[in-house]
Amino acid sequence: MPRFQPLPLLTVFTLASLALLVTLGSWQMQRMSWKADQIAAYEARGEAVSFRTALCEPEDGAFSPPVTGPVPLGGPTLRLYAMRETAGWMRLALMPAPRCRADDPARYLMVEVAFEDLRTETQSSVQVWRLEMPPEPGLFTPGNDPDTNQWYSHDRAAMAATFGIEPDSLLPVWARADTGMPASLSRTPPAKHLGYALTWYGLALALIGVYLALHVSRGRLRFNKPSRDGDKNQKAD
């Protein structure tokens, strides 16, 4: 029968570390499944449509179909920082949104009209778009600076004020350049998340092995074989 005398502090540390490693592995498995669903949604988003169709007849799914012009634009543009192949500024202009019904109030849509590459100092125009909900700012996203026209996250009220319109008249979606599958999906495909998950689970198994081996070396984990003869081998008095 095994005899086990665990080291208290080491056991607490090992259990905490084991829980963390298993959690990270499970999170990567969830990311793998979520990303596979996102890629499938992107690939099944349909043929190109007009802005009116995309806004008035939205399809189910995380991504809209490709959207084509014409794009009636006017007024100033905002510079929104973005990472693509390189860092740059997305130029956002304001477009009167097409009305779905005759009695709809006037609404506006933010549309990316160009991308300024900071490395090459060139500007490329946009011909095809997709409609999305604006991304939420991250923990380390810098603050916006409307005075210098430097934006790092979507702030509906502040952006509407810069354009000179009421916040409620700015649609909650925006039109960004459709340059292919988003980098967040293509750079780390589901197979990579599976590899990450197996790495975390492998570390968890290795931790268990080290924990048990240490206790064996300290004599705190023993596997005693039962005697076949029991007390028969005891010498008689």
Image (tube, grey):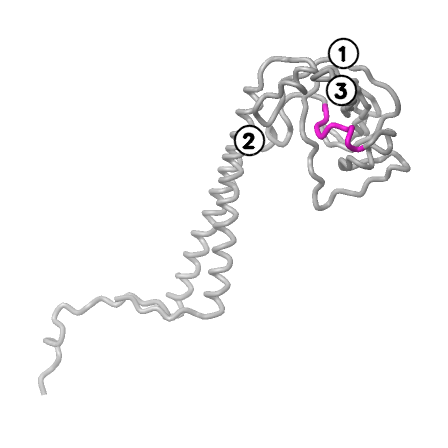
Label 3 to label 1: alpha-carbon separation: 12 Å
- Which of marks 1 and 3 precedes in the sequence? 1
Query: In the current view of this chain or complex, which residue is farthest to the right?
Result: 147
Q: Residue flagged by tag 2: what amino acid is it?
A: Pro
The secondary structure that dominates the magenta segment is: strand
For disc 3, the marked residue is 97
**Quadrant for the C terminus in the image:** bottom left
Label ID, residue 134: none
For disc 1, the marked residue is 70
Q: Which residues are magenta?
A: 167-176
Instruction: Name which residue lies at 58% across and 19% down.
Output: 45
Label 2 to label 3: alpha-carbon separation: 35 Å
Between 45 and 36, the one lying in front of the other is 45
Q: Secondary structure at mark 3?
A: loop
Quadrant housing residue 77: top right
Say if 5 sits above or below 70 in the image: below
Between label 2 and label 3, give the one nearer the viewer: 3
Q: Secondary structure at mark 1?
A: loop
- Which of marks 1 and 2 precedes in the sequence? 1
Say if 138 sits above or below 172 in the image: below
Q: Residue flagged by tag 3: what amino acid is it?
A: Ala
